[in-house]
Image (spheres, rainbow, N blue to C red):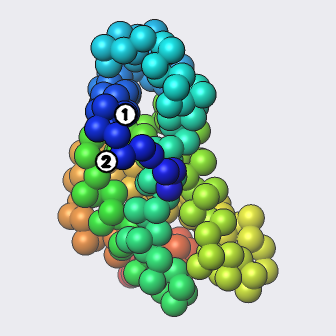
Amino acid sequence: MRERSKDLRVRRTITGIRKSFFELVLEKNYNEISITELTDRAGINRKTFYLHYSSLDDLVSEVEEEIVEEILEAIGESAENFDLKGCITNFYKYLETRNAVQQRLLCDDHYSFFYESVTDAVLKSKPFVKFFEVAAYPTIVRSYTICITFIYRDWLRSGKKIPFDELAAQACQIIENGYNGITKKK
């Protein structure tokens, strides 16, 4: 987490920049957001923005760091205990409690770069490094991790037609047992 000034004016400026950025995230795709538009909306000039961030990507990196910390707080114990069901369920619960901006950043295809960066940071964290050390094929494990999020994203896109608990249970089943774990038994 970055150190920020305790000066009230600085905190207000940063809050204004972030608020304006979050509003733009809900309205536009990342490649459509400009610093000029962001600073106009925040009521500051570009020079003020650059006092706090070196670029729009720098602002995004700060938000990513915060979300990574939150995700690790939500799933850290489960990950440390190699509890796959706990990881998936707690991750889905985390996603369900996010606001519209955070859900867009983590689940919208136009912000996939954000999700990829957050995923990489989470997977480089201490609990997951231990997990990868015992995995025969870490790249396949990474792919499964991405699939867990895609299952959730698809559920969102389809209008949450199945109950949340069933979503989590089915995701756990397919990840633990593959396709055979979720097929209807005859």
Task: Compare marks 1 and 2 and give the one earlier in the sequence.
Answer: 1
- Kind of residue at disc 1: Val
Label at residue 47: none
Label 2: which secondary element: helix
Total marks in image: 2
Q: Secondary structure at mark 1?
A: helix
Vertical placement of residue 103 versus 14, above or below: below
Task: From the viewer's side, name the closer residue of 176 and 38.
Answer: 38
- The residue at the point 31 percent across, 31 percent down is 9
Would you say the residues marked 1 and 2 are in contact, meaning their CB atoms lie under 8 Å apart? no
Indicate the quadrant containing the C terminus: top left, top right, bottom left or bottom right: bottom left
* Percent coordinates x, y for residue 80 in the rendering: 54, 85
Q: CA distance from mark 1 to mark 2?
A: 37 Å
Q: Is residue 143 above or below residue 101?
A: below
Instruction: Residue under label 1, please give it.
Output: 10
* Kind of residue sitting beneath label 2: Leu
The reply to whether residue 134 is visible in this rendering is yes
Q: Which residue is mark 2?
A: 156
Q: Is any part of residue 85 visible from this angle?
A: no
Residue 25: percent from left, percent from top:
37, 28
Answer with left or right where residue 94 lies relative to residue 162: right
- Looking at the image, which residue is at 32% across and 19% down? 42
